[in-house]
Image (cartoon, coloured by chain):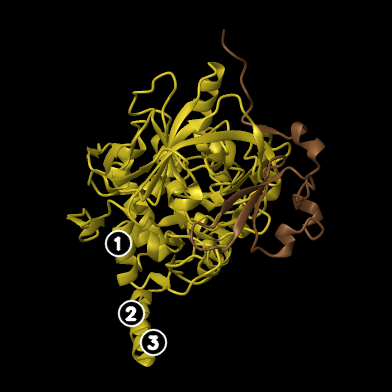
Amino acid sequence: MICPRCDTDKVELLTKSPVGNAWEMYICNTCTYSWRSTETPDKTDPKRYNAKFKIKPESIPNMLVIPPVPPLKA
Amino acid sequence: MKDIQVPSGKTGSTKAYHDLRSFLVTLEAEGQLVRIKDEVDPEEIGAAGRASANLKNGPAVLFEKVKGYANPVVTNVHGSWANHALMMGMDKDTPVKEQFLELSRRWDMYPVGPKRVTNAPVNENTVTENINIFDIISLYRINTYDSGCFLSKACIVSADPEDPTSYGKTNLGTYRMQVKGKDKLGIQALPFHDIGIQLSKAEALNKPVPIAICLGCDPITTFMASTPIRYDQSEYDYVGALNNGVPMEITKSATLGLEIPAGCEICIEGYIEPRVRECEGPFGEFPGSYSGARLQAVVKITAISYRANPVFENLYLGIPWSEIDYLMALNTSVPLYKMLKDTFPEVQAVNAMYTHGIGVIVSTKVRFGGFGKAVAMRLLTTPHGMAYNKIIIVVDEYVDPFNLEQVMWAMTTRVDPDKDVSIIKNCPGMPLDPSSNPPGMHNKLIIDATTPKAPEIVSRETELLTPPAGTAKWEEIISQLVKAARK
């Protein structure tokens, strides 16, 4: 399975629905995007995911850090 | 739980709620809650929250059956002025300015200490192994391009790492949380928020921050969690004040022993992991646009406690106005008003209802030239105002800052752009404001729409029109005729 947002294959099953067999949720271990199997293709299909919200995996380490990590006190 | 009847200073009898459920009963009785009995897809809930906020005095919406989940969801609990008034035990038709003045009156009752109770219903069920948050909470994506399911209305309790037993320094705050696993969450802890101060102290020592994430609290507690107060003040002592002197009930959380709101539906306990950052967001935020994706802090869940059939309370936030704007309107206005009034008794009222105070209107008497601008600069040096307040409009004491028609009149007839508009460059800003550049910095705009006073050069005298004699009498006659005609 491919992540709809960052197109990597590091996707795993997050959970099955607690009641019945209604849906599964998946999560991407690269960009932390998660989605439900019953959602519309603009949220579940890598080809249909809005380009403005796509993430390149290589951009993640350079994202803004909130809050900044302070220096360690000795 | 039973509602407690207490005498009130001004508003007849008021009710104080100790949990969400008793407030939902009142909302329903007042026609301010609707039930959706048919099963809904989880991702319908965000749309319903948006829809209800679009309606005049939109109700809370309770979803009894959510597909694939065991428990109900409620949204838009604070999402109208009617619900806001009912939260305070006031008549649902109470005008906004009256709600502001009553809140301001109760604010001064601080501190009203809490009552510590045992056997709180939230501690009846506790899970500490094989935790799966989805088993207990009916989670859903709020806006289309949110990066997952979010908790948007959690009351988060956290202790000061250097002073963990300090009651006053224990913080109650609302911060967005992205669900990232069965037992893992992301949290946005901005540096100028109280939890940001705690996290920074803990991370310098490489220590985790213990937290208790409480969902579905009584309405005033949730209201206080999003209210900016001083770091060493207690939100719980304010809840008692805003409940008109009725102490709130708190209890120890099941495994970490943090003091939490006793009436909450669900309490998630865990730790913010020190010095860990992970991709989080975007999330549709209160300025009406998506935040970017950022590297933010991570929470490991160690226990979840819950009442029988716990109700998951969450809010929709989108282009204003939506529930979050009602939730953060007067609890942003009153603290800023109190801080200004403390220095300048001339200040009459503060309307900081626009985007959590990014826009503020201050009404004040003017003692001498430049006074309005000085009041605005004081606002910009308050703890909340420093980062959030960006556009400040100052009006005369006879202008109601909650009446935008009057504010526009003041602006159009009092402002000489050459001398009454000031820009202060390179100040602290709110990173979620899409115009903040770089995120967390912005320029401030002060518009002084007060009437000039000496020693400012007053080139033209201003004589205000007054209502002709008999206006009040005719208001009464005409309104009675209108009422009769509508029967």
Question: What residue is pinned by disc 2?
Answer: B476
Evaluate whether label 3 is on the same chain as label 2. yes
Evaluate whether label 3 is on the same chain as label 1. yes
**Looking at numbered disc 2 in the image, what kind of residue is underneath it?**
Glu
Cα–Cα span, label 3 and label 1: 26 Å
The image quadrant that residue B127 belongs to is top left
Q: Position of residue A71 (x, y in %)?
A: 62, 16
Would you say the residues marked 3 and 2 are in contact, meaning their CB atoms lie under 8 Å apart?
no
Q: Residue at x 48, y 44 (%)?
A: B366
Q: Nearer the viewer, mark 3 or mark 1?
A: 1
Q: Is residue B171 above or below residue B290?
A: above
Specify the label residue B90 is tagged with. 1
Q: Nearer the viewer, mark 3 or mark 2?
A: 3
Q: Residue B465 or B396: which is nearer the viewer? A: B396
Q: Quadrant of the N terminus of chain B?
A: bottom left
Q: Position of residue B386 (x, y in %)?
A: 56, 35
Cα–Cα span, label 3 and label 2: 10 Å
| Residue at the extreme top of the image, as rendered | A74
**Looking at numbered disc 1 in the image, what kind of residue is underneath it?**
Met
Q: Colour of chain B?
A: yellow
Query: Label 3: chain?
Result: B
Q: Residue B28 or B354: which is nearer the viewer? A: B28
Query: Label 2: chain?
Result: B
Q: Colour of chain A?
A: brown
Residue B91 seen anywhere in this rendered image of the structure: no
Q: Earlier in the sequence, mark 3 or mark 1?
A: 1
| Residue at the extreme front of the image, as rendered | A21
Specify the label residue B482 is tagged with. 3
The image quadrant that residue B411 belongs to is bottom right
Residue B27 seen anywhere in this rendered image of the structure: yes
Q: Earlier in the sequence, mark 1 or mark 2?
A: 1
Within 10 Å of the Cα at label 3, are there few (<14), some (14-19), or many (20+) other Cα atoms? few
